Each structure stands twice: as C-alpha cells, then as structure tokens.
Image (cartoon, rainbow, N blue to C red):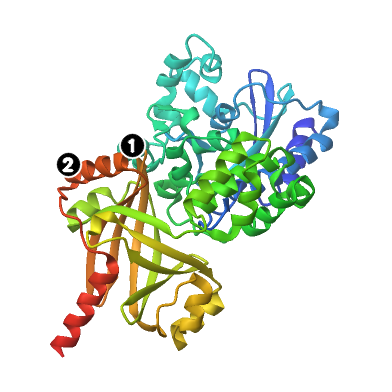
Amino acid sequence: MTRSTDLIEILSTIAAEDDFAAFAYDGVTYALIFHPYSPQIEGKLMVDNYYPAYQAVRAKRLSLEQATADFAPMAVEYPYKGIALLSGKVKRLYNSLTAHEEYGTYFVMEMLCYRGEWAKESEFAAQLEGVGVDLQAFLTPTHPDHLAARGLADPYVTYSGCAECGKCVLACPTGAIQPPDFCRDKCLREWQGKGEFPIEVAKAMGSRVLGCHTCQAVCPVNVGKIPTAPIVDGDALWQGVIEGKKGLLPFGDLLGHNYLRPVKLGVLCLNALANARDPQAKEVAAQWLTHPDERLRLAARRYLERVGVKPQLEREVKGLIDQQTYLAYCDKGVTTLQTNYYLQAGDHRLRIRHKGEDWELTLKVRVGEDRELGHYEYNAPLSSEVAQRFLTEGLPRADTLRYLGIDVGGDATLLGSLSTYRTVWIQDGLRWELDKSEYLGVTDYEIECEVDSEEEWLRAKEWVKTHMGVEEQSIGKYKRFCRRLEQLKQEK
C-alpha cells in the first residue's frame, strides 16, 4: 500500500458523508474537507448555522491531524480559499464566499498539508498555469503581481454568473460587496467581532447575533436550498449571557469558546432585542446601565430607549407604489412572509402578527390627527398556543389589559388576515421595508421606512420622492384592510 493511498483512505474515512479533495501542488500535498450545513429561518437572536458547522469540520480536521501524524501534517500557509480553488471543487463569488458544486455557499472547509507529492497534481492548477497565471502571485495577496494574476485567473476561478447578477451587491445591508473587491471592514461579521458599532450598523443587524447570510439567501447558486430551524436556541443563549461565563459553557462545543465573550454577546443580544422591540430584557438592561464596560452600557441605553417602560413612538415614511416599481426593488434584500391578523374592540384596532416561529400582539395609538406625526405602539410577545386561542375564541378585554397594560373597553373579535411578503434592506443608514400585501382579493405594494429623528425623516421622504415618485403618505395596512372589508360588505 502506498503512502498516497493511505492518506486518501484516511481522509475519505474521516470526511464520511462530506465531500473532500486531495491534490499536490508545488511539492506539497493538500487534504481538504468540505462540510455542508443548512440555511436557516431567521428568528429572534439569530446565530448563523455556519458557526456550529465550523466546529464540526474543525473536529474532523483534528481527527485527520491525529490519524496522519506519521505524515507530519502542517497548517496551510496560503489563504484557504485560494487552495480550495485549486481543488477544482469550488468557484469564487463576488461576495468573497466560494460556491461548492453541490453545497452552494452553505458549507465550511478545513485543510492540512504535507510535504511531498502524496496525491495527483492539481489539474486545475495546471490549467491556470497553462493560460499564464502566476500561481505564487495568485495565492499570495501581498505579492506585487497579485492583482494581475487574479485578473488573469478570474474567468476560470469565478462563478460565471456573478458578473451579470449583482443580487448580493444590492442586498448587502452595509454595502460591503463592491466588485471586484470585498470591503471586509463593512461586513456585519466584522462589526460583531468588535462588539461595538454605529447606529446604522446596529439597525442593519436586525435579529442577528452572530453571522449574516443575506448575500447567501439571494445568491442563485443556492436556489433550492431549504431553510431549517436554527441549531442554536437564541433564548437559551440569552439566558447564558445573563449568567456569564459559567452560563455560556454549554455552548462551547457548539460555537467554539472564542465566541463566548459575555460582554460582546450581551451587546449583540441586546441590539437584536432592541431591533425587535422585545421587552424581555428590561430588568437586565437596567442593571447594565452601570456596567464597567462602556459597550454594554451603550447597548443597554439604546435597548431601553427603543423598548423602555413607555410605549414606543413609531414614525414612518410610507407610500403605495405600483407593481413595476416593486419588481425593480424586490431583489435588494431577503424576503420573508408575515401574516397580520386584525382584531377590533370598539374604536381600538389590534393586531396579532405571525412571523416565522414568533407571535406578537400590538396596539397602535395615533399621536395626533396628522398621520406624519406617527403613533405609539404597545407590543407583547405571545406563545403560539395563546395566539391561536385568541384567533379562534376572540381576545378578552382582561387579556388585552394583562398583556399590553391598556384597557380597550371590550373584547376584541377577529376581522380577518393580511399576508405580507416583506423585503428588507439598508441604504444610506436607513432601513427600508418593501411590502407586497395580499388580503381580501387585493394585492398592493408599499415602501416603508421607520425613522428615529427629524433628519432621517427628511432624508427618507426625499429618497422615496426621488426614486419611487411617492409624495403622499399612505394610510396603513389595517385601514386599507378595513376599507376593503367594508367595500365587500356593500357589494353584497
């Protein structure tokens, strides 16, 4: 049995169901493992499935290192993605990721190298050299000829659809994807690693705690990849953050201990809860207002300002648009489905919203007669069981008071539902929501932007006027629903 056969047999055994590759280049043999994972449904306190997947493939690399100890395994000196390209198994994408021929972008990889040629020479490397690519320059970002080599290699190493697509460029919430380059400093993952970020980045993170799969979700190479439930329980992670290092220990094998920094995770969790206006962290945030670390103090302050003990003042720029305008912008971000169930108690209009696995009860009270002044919003999370009971049996007056702290004067009854396909993206520090709503035989389209200041209000109004021709503030979904309901009654 040859040493080459030994290496490949060991590699294939450890990789198990995962794809793998072994090839030689420049007197060194490289062994790679490609481990797939599933995209996930976005939810509260989202941790990308990438992180548990990386721990799994890292464990396989350690097993390979031990099993091939006699071959003197070494860490790979070149950038991982460059070596992966030489395997011929993946292609480079403009969003800085690589796409596997079977897994799309939803995979992680690990590799080791060994001196000597214990596998076949890389056919793809020979192909690149055959067209004049200097591979040493291509694999070394600091090499003076790196850009020239990269440009020459581009048609062979880059996914062919990238140049004409551009969906990831439009969808990136912080503008980090700027072909032919990727601005790492703007990526949400980089900001998450710092544990502090400006307000526009805080908004862009949404429900994310670790990771951002926005560019992956819109990438054509991932068509057909079915989202699954998150591997990491966000509520359990938040509880671990509250308890500190000891509380986070159970997540060590799942996420890796490098990510289990209580302060950073505390900041990120508070930010996600603030964006969702989830009131569950009020007591903890109040305690953290005097925390020794300024990052956590600032996060607690923003959270309490966003959620607070008072109702949230919501002010939006919003306008109805036509289908053509909607279609021109619906590829700019990730689209999710949410369903609003509308209930009425006297003059009070309530909403139960279902999005993913979450349910929420909301009451909106207008500040004044002018729609542009905004409204106060009272919110409370519901369990699925309670929400379903309210929808089938009605919402008792006492339960509205218990959940929202507001007496609406009577029991609320269900009027009907409205389903919205919402596309969210960040542009110029503003969070835009593009909605396609379906209700009572009607489909309409709307652009919305929630603002926190007069300056944002003016910028948002100017943007929708310039880009979408919207000058008049539209009425809300609830009122449009009720008008349509009344129209149908009159037609009978």
Q: Is residue 116 visible?
A: yes
Instruction: Using the rendered view, name the quadrant where residue 132 is placed.
Output: top left
Instruction: Using the rendered view, name the quadrant where residue 472 is placed.
Output: bottom left
**Real-space Cα distance between discs 1 and 2?**
14 Å
For badge 1, the amino acid type reads Asp
Q: At numbered mark 2, what does the secondary structure look like: helix, strand or loop?
A: helix
Query: Residue at the location (42% across, 39% down)?
Result: 200
Q: Is residue 19 visible?
A: no
- State the mark number for residue 428: 1
Position of the N terminus by quadrant = top right
Q: Is residue 388 above or below residue 322?
A: below
- State the mark number for residue 466: 2
Position of the C terminus by quadrant = bottom left
Residue closest to the far right: 70
* Residue 46 location (% of width, % of height): 56, 52
- 151 left or right, relative to 13: left
For badge 2, the amino acid type reads Thr
Instruction: Using the rendered view, name the quadrant where residue 89 is placed.
Output: top right
Query: How many marks do you count on the picture?
Result: 2
Q: At numbered mark 1, what does the secondary structure look like: helix, strand or loop?
A: loop
Residue closest to the far top: 144
Query: Residue at the location (30% across, 57% down)?
Result: 374
Query: Residue at the location (70% across, 23% down)?
Result: 117
Residue 206 vs residue 180, the one in the foreground: 206
Q: Residues within 10 Å of mark 1 (few under 14, many from 20)?
A: few
Residue 276 vs residue 49, the one in the foreground: 276
Query: Residue at the location (78% across, 38% down)?
Result: 62
Contact, mark 1 vs mark 2 (Cβ under 8 Å): no
* Residue 163 location (% of width, % of height): 33, 34
Q: Residues within 10 Å of mark 2 (few under 14, many from 20)?
A: few
Residue 253 vs residue 301, the one in the foreground: 301
